[in-house]
Image: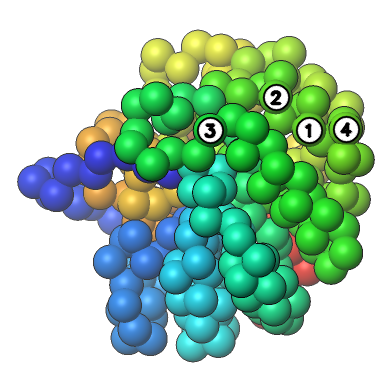
Amino acid sequence: MVCDVSTKVLPPPAPEPLAPLIDAHTHLDACGARDADDVAAILDRAGAVGVQAVVTIADDLAAARWAAAAAGWDDRVYAAVGLHPTRADALDDAARAELETLAAEPRVVAVGETGMDLYWPGRLDGCADPATQVEAFAWHIDLAKRLGKPLMIHNRDADAAVLDVLRAEGAPETVIFHCFSSGPEMARSCADAGWYLSLSGTVSFRNARELRAAAPLIPADQLLVETDAPFLTPHPYRGARNEPYCLPYTVRALAELLDRPAGDVAADSSANARRVYNLTY
Ligand SMILES: [Zn+2]
Ligand SMILES: [Zn+2]
């Protein structure tokens, strides 16, 4: 994600524990972690409220190197590597070669985040244009297929474009839409295709009407949950700094929306995460 995170607001208090949970998409480096001690401290805070493992995501090459290393520092951390669609301009031959090597590492459990972002072009200096994003997305799809690893998709204001590229290239066996924020029609298309939809704090936002109408359409065995920390802090702490320990807030808001026990949503989503990422812990 590319967005502003306030550093002036106090961090949210620790939620009531809810276990077992797996944070399917987070950015430990953007949460401020530099070394193994920092990573352990974040995972200790998460573990204290039931978040047992996280997948930390890279959005550029330096972050990819860091994420793959972090997955080796701590048993509770796995990684995904790729170039964020807004940074698709950086996908030169050297970047491709390095990403291929990193993505093949055993604790790198997905390729991404990749996909399409039609919000930032024209708003963010240096953001890759849509045509460049399509080309990079296609390359990541091919890499995921060759490695037999899940594809982690970032989709911002780009439902039709993402589906077009997936159809044109042929989707890999396992596809995850991270921070799924679209409406019912897109949820149905993805669910019918057998793809996984990962919900973030946005599902707890009262004004996210389309998403809140879509969430009940996600089959229980295709649902993941994530923080996308340090971004998208769940209600009522919107605007504060997010971290994996905040995941129970999102899952409780989702459970209320689905009218299901929070423990069941936690158990389903973590079983799905274990299966989809082939987690070994
Ligand atoms: Zn992200
Ligand atoms: Zn994203």
As drawn, 80 above or below 151: below
Q: Work out which residue is located at the far left of the displayed protein and give it.
A: 8
Where does residue 262 sit, x and y in percent of width and height? 56, 41
Circle nearer the N terminus (2, 3): 3
Disc 1 vs disc 2: Cβ atoms closer than 8 Å?
yes
Disc 3 residue type? Asp
The residue shown at (51%, 76%) is 65
State how far apart marks 1 and 2 are (Cα): 6 Å
The residue tagged 1 is 165
As drawn, 28 above or below 177: below
**Is 200 displayed left or right of 133 in the figure?**
left
Figure quadrant of the N terminus:
top left
Q: Which of the 4 image quarters holds residue 2?
A: top left
Circle nearer the N terminus (1, 3): 3
Could one spot residue 158 in this view of the protein?
yes
State how far apart marks 2 and 4 are (Cα): 10 Å
Circle nearer the N terminus (3, 4): 3
Disc 1 vs disc 4: Cβ atoms closer than 8 Å?
yes
Disc 1 vs disc 3: Cβ atoms closer than 8 Å?
no
The residue shown at (34%, 84%) is 35
Whether the residue under disc 2 has CB within 8 Å of ligand 2: no
- Camera-nearest label, 3 or 4: 3
Whether the residue under disc 4 has CB within 8 Å of ligand 2: no
Disc 1, SS: helix
State how far apart marks 1 and 3 are (Cα): 15 Å
- Camera-nearest label, 2 or 3: 3
The residue shown at (31%, 77%) is 34
State how far apart marks 2 and 3 are (Cα): 13 Å
Disc 4 residue type? Ala
The residue tagged 3 is 129
**Is 18 displayed left or right of 220 in the figure?**
left
